[in-house]
Image (cartoon, rainbow, N blue to C red):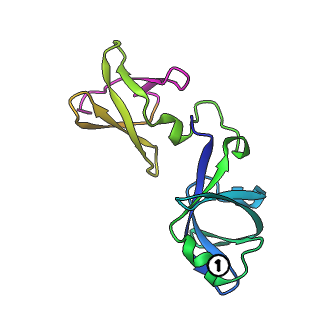
Amino acid sequence: MEDLLQVGVITSPHGLKGEVKVFPTTDDVQRFKKLKEVILDTGKESIKLEIMGVKFFKNLVILKFKGLDDINEVEQYRQKSLLIRREQSAPLKEGEYFITDLIGLQVFTEDGKEFGVLADVMQTGANDVYIIKTLEAKEVLIPAIKDCVLNIDIKKQRMVIYLMPGLI
């Protein structure tokens, strides 16, 4: 399991005083109001940043970090990820999982046959869709609903699915 979870990606500077626009990758954008700090992943290093201000604009979050007071200081961070430690994350409800914990799960059919590996999760309006890479290297899309996903065991890295007629 990953110890760091992505909560957003810096898209661009906002104004001249060091604020940045962030595309949130968390389900709850209000979450940023509760965060005191984030970790900036520059690709070369991880930098702990203290959050001094949070605003919302359309589908973006505008953040102000302590010590970054000029557009030139934040310009270099375009398209860089903002991370939090797992213990900073919001508690999950029963049946909820972090996407990073799902990717890589071994997928089995209800009769115990190995089917493939969960390769990615597509987030749609109604429900998530699991993209499973089969043993034959094909992609199969499975809706993340109780009728199709019978069991998820993160500790055992295993998912059991029911293949509804017409899904393949």
Is 45 above or below relative to 167? below
Q: Where in the figure is residue 3, as x and y percent of width and height?
A: 62, 40
Q: Does residue 55 lie above or below 29 as drawn?
A: below
Q: Residue at x 38, y 25 (%)?
A: 107
Residue 82 left/right relative to 131: right
Characterize the magenta stretch by its predominant secondary structure. loop
Residue at 36%, 20% in the rendered image? 108
Q: Where residue 86 sits: x, y (%)?
A: 67, 42
Left or right: 108 in relation to 58: left
Q: Is residue 126 above or below residue 72?
A: above
Which residue corresponds to mark 1? 73
Q: On screen, 88 above or below 152?
A: below
Magenta run includes residue 167: yes
**Image location of residue 119, percent across then percent down:** 37, 39
Q: Which residues are magenta?
A: 146-168
Q: Secondary structure at mark 1?
A: helix
Image quarter for residue 163? top left
Q: Residue furthest bottom?
A: 16
- Quadrant of residue 130 within the rendered picture: top left
